[in-house]
Amino acid sequence: MNDRDDGSCVYGLRQQARCLAGVHNESDSSQFLVGTTGPKKDNHLHLLDFDDSTFTLQSSLYGHPQEIWDIATCPFNEHHFFTTYSNDDGSLGSSLWQKDPADHQEQTMSSRSDTSKDLKVLWAPCGEKSRIATVSDTSIAVYALDAGNHNVENITTWEIENGKEASPWSVHNAIWSSHNDELIATYGSTVAGWDVRSNKATFERQRAHASNIRSVDYNRNKPHHIVTGGDDAAMRIWDTRNLTSPLMEVVNHTHWIRSVAYNMVHDQLILSSGSDTLVNLQSAVSVSSASYMGKTLDSDDDESDSSMDEPRELPTDGLIKTYDQHEDSVYSVAWSHSDIWVFASLSYDGRVVVNRVPTSEKFKILGI
Amino acid sequence: MGISAWVSVREYLIRVDMGEQLPPRRKPRNDLLRNYYGIGGKASGKGNDTSDIDGPNFDSAKYQNKLLKESKLDLLISRDNELVTEIRELDGDMKTLVYENYSKFISATDTIRKMKSNVEDMETEMDRLRDHMSKVTAHSSTIDKELAPRRDKIRQLDGVHNLLKKLQFIFELPNRLQQCYNSGAYPQAVRYWARTTHLFDHYQQLTVFHNIENECKDIMKRVRQKLKDAMHASNASIQIITENTSMLIQLKEDPTSLSKEYIALQSAKLEDLKGKHLVTLQNERHNDDSMRSFNEEYLADLNIVVASYQRFFMSDGQPPEISALGMSTSNTSRRSLGSASQKGSISNQEAHSSAHLSESEREEANSLLILAFSPLLDEYLETVKYAIRIPSDPLGLPRPLPQIQILNDAYSAIVHDSSALCEVLLAEQRILDIVKDWESELLTSLMHDAAAGLEERFKVFSEKVVASQQTSANVDPGILTTFVIDTEEWLANFMGMDSLQLLAECLQSGASFVSGKPRKDMFLKQIQSGLLKHWRLVVDSIKDHMTNVESKSLVHQTVSLVASRLCLDFAEIWVIKTYAQFSKELYPVSRRSSNPYRQEDDRDLIVPLLEPDVQESTDLYREAGQLCLISYARTIGYMFTDKIEGFLRDKQWLMLKEKDWIPSSVSSVWTEIASELEIVERMVDIVYPIDSENADRSAESEYSVPRTNRLGSQSPSEIGLSPTNQRLGITSPSMTSLSSFTSAANNDSQATNAMPRTYGNDLLSNISKLFQERIEIYGHIDPSALDVCGALVKVILKAYNEILREVTLNKYAFWQLQVDVEYLRIVLWKFARNEKLLNSMLEEICASAYRRCTQPISLDSSISDQILGAYEQ
């Protein structure tokens, strides 16, 4: 942990864990929520607080007896989040929780709403009312939360029909895109989109990968651009308006890809993690929003001065770095919501590793 | 010791005798002697060594002193003796020389005496001769004087005669012209007129001539009209038009309008001619004769028309022929008159007819020419192109290709016989372009045939596989092997024999468009790039086919497996063989003489020029082969994954609840997978047999096959393809086993496979993991059943572990799982390449299951033993 530049910060949960989510907090430190999975009712929710200045992780532990399969943090309120867990009878349920905003240390959580048979819950990233979507094996239901977050009202449901998938299929993953209010789901080897406003399917690409697609993410800066990761160890970037062939294919894993994540600001940075225990940080400048900018790079950074005389290294496509600090399958990887250069990855053995984008790459992107 | 030495010694001795210096007069004498014997120059160059007795600078005194000082008495005596003998010898020599010179001197005196007496006679004779000559001179001068006045008169008379003759010609001219006009001998008339026009100009002031001139002009006007009429007559031939135009030019017709008229008439004629030929050409396709006559008549005419035009309207300034028109040089004019009687050939006419145009007018004429005739040439070239186009099946054409003949005719007709077209319309460049296009078209057509043929074969093969699949789950191995052998042989023969032969024939046809180094090189280069394109096309066609076949089907699997074998075989054998054949046939380079007792390695035959291509193609195929093989293994792996996932997520299995339930058998999914693995093993074994089994047989077959005609032909009846390297004796790097993972060296904590063990010992397993090497699940796969199955085992177990972690097990499910794992341990053992790896992966599955189980209670091992006992047979 001494190396402040490209070092990483490791935290052990002492329990198996699968899910990790970045908290949309307002403070400077990066917060992540991690939920453990153990069938023996002794699970915990860890709130990890990464302090960039001291390069340390502080954790707060919350009891959560049921094993946690997924966590969805609210994009508007840092204290709200959903967990998806298995009930005693083996069915899956989700609950909305609220951390007490007054006292950080107090472990108060309250279950607000309850649905059943969920694989995961999605927060609508946009819109006036708080909306959520619950993802089950064959459908995605969209609900509106009332003001007190006590009740939900079903707005619409996307019943996914797929007669063409040969093998038995179920929804593996889904994401709610802020562009066009669109739900994107992957099932079998198919990726498909659904417009929440018009209740209509927007696109469908069968056999987007050679086998199951277990991860998907959308580009925050570039509408219609999504990334998928599949059992064929390939990561593919698609433009959903033209799905005949992927914009880019990256193969640098050697087993299933379990998680992919676009950087929130610099969408040329894509994280992927898989059951080959690797976390890869990939640069895909040519198909990112940065490709529009040509030579003048990100202008939202005040430091980038106007003198363009000095020739400097431009970011290029390719693998930036492989992080091999995990020894088990890495099921989850997430970017921090407060520091765009920080990300965390979680392997099944309960190891959380917080890393930063290598400084050299960062400078390249910023054009310093 | 030479003469000079002798002289020196002589002098020395004299000096020794007399004890005084040489008299000075001797020096010139010595020089004379030296000169006479030609040693003067040489001696002076010999250096200044005073002790050299033969040297010119020999200093006898010094020598003597030196001798006296340095030598002992006996040495001196012997030296003295030596010198005495040498001197004696030289004396003798000199005497002989003196005698010889003396006799020469005597004979010289005799000769001089004789000459003296003869010269005395000659002087008197000479005097007499001189007298006679002066007399002759006097006589001749008197005769000359007397004849002089008459000679002048004759000269005058001759001049008058000439003038009268010319005048007579002029006076007779109207009659002659009329006569010519009447008899239709227009060229003659034109020629007369052309000769006289400038005379009329000259004698304008003499009224006598006016009448004649007017009369002549009148006749010539009619002649002109006649000529024009003749030109415009519908049956006027190209030659007539050309001749008449030539005459009109001589009659000073306006060149600009004439040129336009000429172009209009000639192009109409050529159109007609072309139309006629095209009809015949279309009626009898690929008829050499009609094409040739088209060349001879149409192209030749076009050339003549253009050439004449060039001469008429585009020659620059004053060609020397113009002076021939004048009356003054009667000599040439007489010759032209004489030749006029022969019905003038075009070349003859051309020689003296050209309009005088200014620079700008010439340019305009040139542009008119190009405008008018380049479409005609275009059409000709189009016709040629049409005639030489390559049909879809070039190998089915009669040999030698009729196109070669046509192209050759056209090429030589243009390049050798149509200089005017080449000059004005760049015909040579264009025909060269056509040649180039044709060559590349030929190649493309061949390559496409190959790709199409391959695709067809794949299609048929797929259908066969589908058909055989319907009757039994297993694909008949015979189909696979015959397909691989047939296809390889067909494709190799297509390229190596048939296509190559065709190309070699083209190259060696002696056609002018492929003879000569630059054109030949051009063709070879085209062939080279065509061949490279061919390999790519074939690979693409294989890949295309794989994407076209519905994936996840058995057909897809079979096709990709077979395709991988095809590609790898190409990488190892056929590419090299084909290039060797090409090198042999097309690049006749003197090769290293090969040992007749050793089989020539194909690689040795390849010319260095093609080496990079070979490397590129080989790599291409090797890569494609590996890709197909991986695709094969992956597809099967995905199917297994789906199966395992479907099974593990099955609620019924996870919700087993009966109180006294104990596992009674292995889950069906695993038995299915095991049997499918066996099928895979068999399939791969068919396509990639293991070396040791077939080594003997293939070696036998290799020697029994004569290497002469077909490329490495092999009896298709042989079941099971022999391994690549065996068949061709090529050591292939890809065949050497390249294990994708090394054994987990330090993994000693999990060596035993006793089932009931302490699970969840996280620390221990984590530590062991630290030392364990990372397992690459999707990696490189060697073309062997062992490696393919080994890779599949890894995929199966990894998928099992991954999905297991997403479900929750109860006690009964955990029991069942224990039975399943033990079963897998037994079944997969023979497929796993690495037992340690298998065990550690199974351990990991057990550990995962233990963690995912609510009540992890081990099953009594006797139960599992009992169940597994049934399977072990």
Image: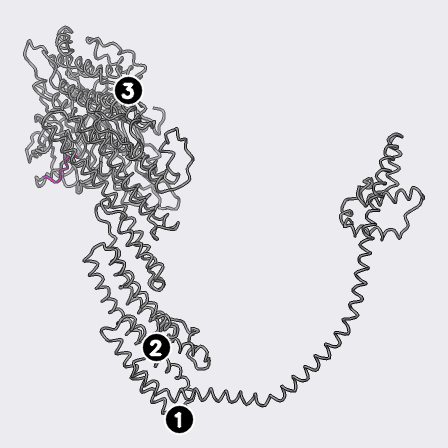
Amino acid type indicated by mark 2 = Ile
The x, y position of residue B421, in whole percent, is 33, 63
B246 vs B422: above or below: below
Mark 1 → mark 2, Cα distance in angstroms:
28 Å
Viewer-nearest of discs 3 and 1? 1
Residue type, numbered disc 1: Val
Q: What residue is shown with label 1?
A: B208
In this view, the residue in front, A195 or B78, is B78
Q: Chain of mark 2?
A: B
Q: Find out whether the residues at labels 3 and 1 contact each other: C-beta distance under 8 Å.
A: no
1 and 2 marks in contact (CB < 8 Å): no
How far apart are the alpha carbons under marks 3 and 1?
119 Å
Seen from the viewer's position, the closer of residues B361 and A346 is B361
Q: What amino acid is found at the position of numbered circle 3 in the picture?
A: Ser
The magenta segment is: A201-207
**Residue wearing tag 3:** B692
Q: Give the chain letter at badge 3.
A: B
Task: Specify the label residue B249 is tagged with.
Answer: 2
